[in-house]
Amino acid sequence: MSALAGKTILMSGGSRGIGLAIALRAAADGANIAMLAKTDTPHPKLEGTVHTAAEQIGAAGGQALPIVGDVRDDDDITAAVLKTQGEFGGIDIVVNNASVIDLSRSLELGAKKYDLMQDVNVRGTFMLSRAAIPMLKDAENPHILSLSPPLNPTPKWLGAHTGYTLAKFGMTMVTLGLAAEFARDGIAANTLWPRTTIATAAVQNLLGGDEVMAASRTADIYADAAYSVLTKPAAGYTGQTLIVEEVLEADGVTDFSSYAAVPGTPDDRLFPDIFLD
């Protein structure tokens, strides 16, 4: 039997990009995927909604539960947890995928965008994970996975985009805190971050356009690494800030060429992701 067959994942976001890739990798095993996302209707500039994501999950072999809601809203979080439990009988995994990015310097960053990043990235990670803890305690191999970087409080990254850095490091600190707090309950909590940029809309629109997209890896590499993390025994694999490529290397993967967004791009031509030295 496939490792995630019959397992239930509650994910924030996931209508497109990395979150959807992780969902589809789990769906191939026959997993249940509940997605709490705002994208009820098509966005003029971004592809995919929670409903199109659900269709893709079903086509990949999984069971999907699209939940239209906002991870900033406590009532929406409670409803998502209850709907997931009611539909699938429990929750085995929480994936904190929803995230807002704004790389503005401190004097240019608007107060509303600062608050949005804190509310979605940090508060959303904390509240969604916390709401699912009672169900995770009953799960056989419970995991929390947050898509955030290792803590690297060097001047290079603290000073690059202070508001966004604070929000992403906050996600990581929440996750590490939960790992320590609920270790006795056997709940794993880890973060996962790529060594290179991933070809997503965020990279296209915010990090350098077509040039950086061409020097990125596909979301499949993130999905394969997340799958590896989520299938590890929870009790002995927790409290780590993991790097996508290192997770796969530990599993024996040595050739990442198939993940290049542009086939044939050598590794030394790929664009390094932020937060890693």
Image (cartoon, grey):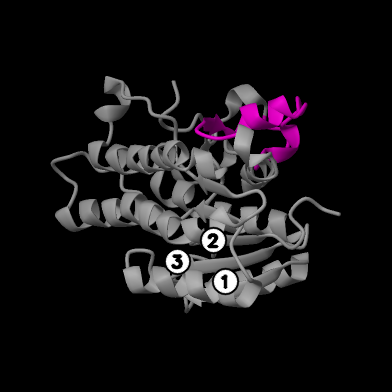
Which of the numbered marks, if any, corresponds to residue 45?
A: 3
In terms of depth relative to the viewer, which is nearer, 211 or 87?
A: 87
Q: Is residue 72 above or below residue 183?
A: below
In terms of depth relative to the viewer, which is nearer, 15 or 44?
A: 15
- Separation of residues labelled 3 and 1 (CA atoms): 33 Å
Q: Position of residue 142 (x, y in %)?
A: 60, 50
In the image, farthest residue toward the left: 107
Foreground: disc 3 or disc 2: 2
Name which of mark 1 and mark 2 comes first in the sequence.
Answer: 1
Residue 69: tell me if it is visible. no
Label 1: state its secondary structure: helix
Quadrant position of residue 70: bottom left
From the viewer's perspective, is 205 left or right of 196?
left
Residue located 53% across and 48% down the image: 144
Foreground: disc 3 or disc 1: 1
In terms of depth relative to the viewer, which is nearer, 32 or 101?
A: 32
| Magenta span of residues | 237-265
Quadrant position of residue 128: bottom left
In the image, farthest residue toward the front: 184
Q: Which residue is mark 2?
A: 135
Q: Is residue 32 above or below residue 118?
A: below
Q: Amino acid type of disc 2?
A: Met
Residue contact between numbered discs 1 and 2, judged by CB atoms under 8 Å: yes
Residue located 57% across and 35% down the image: 215
